[in-house]
Amino acid sequence: MITISENAAHKVKQMLQQPEFAEKPLIRVSVVSGGCSGLSYKMDFDASALETDERFEDKGLTLVCDKKSFFYLIGTELDYSEGLQGKGFHFVNPNASRTCACGESFSL
């Protein structure tokens, strides 16, 4: 399962009120090759899920993920912060054995 924190859910709901996001109500999370640790997180908004996607409902929002990425993201929480380290979405992944300093890439 992939979940979303209260902070991230609040921010996503705010964003979905804006015209550029209104037509894309799904949160698509994935993992792609790259970054200094080997794998990078990716988050987008999408209009529809694929038949092969994993689908999760949390805090009134729907998250979708391709099956390959789900293997890396099992148990992950999508979070949002506005702290001194900068503001934005980030992934809290219990499967990551190593992450880079910026938190945008990881390895298992």
Image: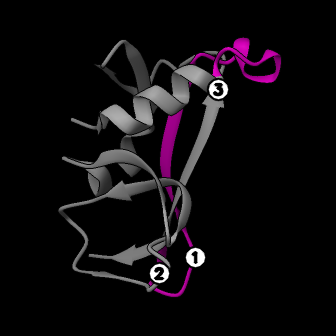
Secondary structure state at the residue bearing disc 2:
loop
Report which residue position mark 2 lands on: 38
Please give the label number shown on residue 15.
Answer: 3
Nearest the viewer among 69 and 101 is 101
Quadrant location of the N terminus?
top left
Residue type at mark 1 is Gly
Q: Residue at x 37, y 40 (%)?
A: 67
Left or right position of 50 against 79: right
Nearest the viewer among 86 and 38 is 86
Q: Position of residue 29 (x, y in %)?
A: 48, 42
Report which residue position mark 1 lands on: 34
Q: Quadrant of residue 24?
A: top right
Q: Quadrant of residue 43?
A: top right
Q: Residue at x 47, y 74 (%)?
A: 105
Determine if the magenta segment contains residue 20: yes
Could you give the CA–CA distance between mark 1 and mark 3, rounded to whole angstroms?
27 Å
Magenta residues, start to end? 16-39
Left or right position of 16 against 56: right
Q: Is residue 62 above or below residue 6?
A: above
